[in-house]
Image (cartoon, rainbow, N blue to C red):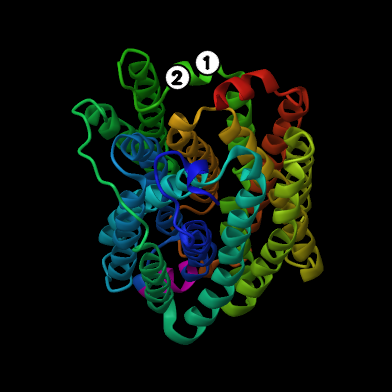
Amino acid sequence: MSSASAGARKVPAYGVPTIIVAQFVPTFLAGGITLALPPMGVDLQAGASALGLVESLYLAGTVSMLLPSGRLCDATDKATLYKYGMLAFALTTALIGMLSSVPLILFLRLIEGMCAALVAVAGPALLSEFVPPERRGRVFGLMLSSVYAGLTLGPVATGWLVDHWGWRGAFLGCAAAIFVAFLLAVRLPAAWRRPARDALHLPSTLLLVLAMVVLVLGAAGLNYGFTGWTVLAIGVLLAGVFVAWQTKLAAPVLDVPLLAANPGLARALLVQVLVYVNPMCMAFFMTLYIQVTRDQSAQFAGQLLAFGSVVMICIAPQAGALADRVRPAVIATTGVAFTAAGAAIAAFLDENSSMIQVMAALVIQSIGFALFSSPNLTMVMNSVSREKSSTAAALTAKARSLGMLAGMTISAALVAIFLGNAPVEREPLGILQPMTLGFTIMALLTGAGVFIGSRGQRIGQQTAEAARR
């Protein structure tokens, strides 16, 4: 990589490999922590709804800070935010592993998600700054392979840690891995500059955080009837107020005009939301199904969850390289179809299903993610100018996290309706009904993504070319 291809910033030889390797760590955490939920519930006497909040609040923190992180990256320095976001991420994760208070753990999971947002935005934005457009597909494919390696090793390592050291060992082990990633990134050249006063609209940022928190609390409290539904409705209303407010700001957190003027970008992001309703729902319900309903160890559950990620590691680089030669939308839409098929297979699981059916659902969905992720990311990053790279990275990370939050919110709502806050181990078969309904909803939503993606395969190449000039 030449420095010329990165614009004004000189690209060090280790820059791209460092970022690619460091992307392994956040997904190492995301891929494995679900395995710690059942023993955490037993140790801390936390019920099903509280366990759902452990995942949902992390995603709420991530979703609420992705767009503000993009604004800050554009206004200050991507490398600085990337490094210190990783450090804060490590410290927060370690602290969670030392606590016994469920409310404090839930609060820190929200903060942990906010730290993860900085890493999720700054990493791809730095890559797009370091790498010219004609080589981004392959580099993003390598980055996603690193992400999938985290998803693969996360469940295996965390399953082993949970079986031998308990749920606390899982968080402390993940914190150590995140700190190693910080040490890898600390040598990236930084050029910090003070942000302009209007670089980030703080009131609407706080409103976004509040909206996401209220949404997930409402979904987790649906077993309380009218109160839960009211809180959920307030969250939806606050989110709507946030979007409406952005159209009136000179420097909005959410660039609504950018999406309105760029239909290819908007379509790619919408499909990404619909695809990513699947992974957290799949991980959450599969973890409970394997460990509670089928009475298997956390390590065994981790090995099954990791199997699908191995498939993603093998396929993602080829899908990224192919996206440099073939229209990316064709590959991405094929991936969406595979993802929907995996959810449909999982919807037919019951207490007597073979583990081969479990593996088939995971592998087919993993093929879908591998085919979809890199081509879709290439479409997004190539549809904007280099000056908007951080904003585009934030938008694609937000779409991904918003989809995962939607999937986890649906899962938490179903658990709240069918199980309430009762300990899941008391009724091992109780998880089957919300799980079946959850996977059915995921399959239908992803099927809508196939329709939208197939209609949008003729992405405006002239728009993308104009954006890159």
Dividing the image into 4 quarters, which one contains the C terminus? Answer: top right
Q: Tell me the quarter of the picture where residue 185 sits.
A: bottom left
Dot 2 lies on which element? helix
Q: Is residue 11 visible?
A: yes
The image shows residue 76, relative to residue 100, as above or below, that is: above
CA neighbours of label 2 inside 10 A, class few (<14), some (14 to 19), many (20+): some
Mark number displayed over residue 260: 1
- Total marks in image: 2
The amino acid pointed to by label 1 is Ala
CA neighbours of label 1 inside 10 A, class few (<14), some (14 to 19), many (20+): few
Task: Find residue 378 and report its horizontal and vertical position in percent.
Answer: 63, 39
Q: Which residue is mark 2?
A: 256
Rendered residue at 52%/67% (across/down): 32
Q: Nearer the viewer, residue 123 or 462?
A: 462
Q: Is residue 38 magenta?
A: yes
Q: Are marks 2 and 1 in contact (CB under 8 Å)?
A: yes
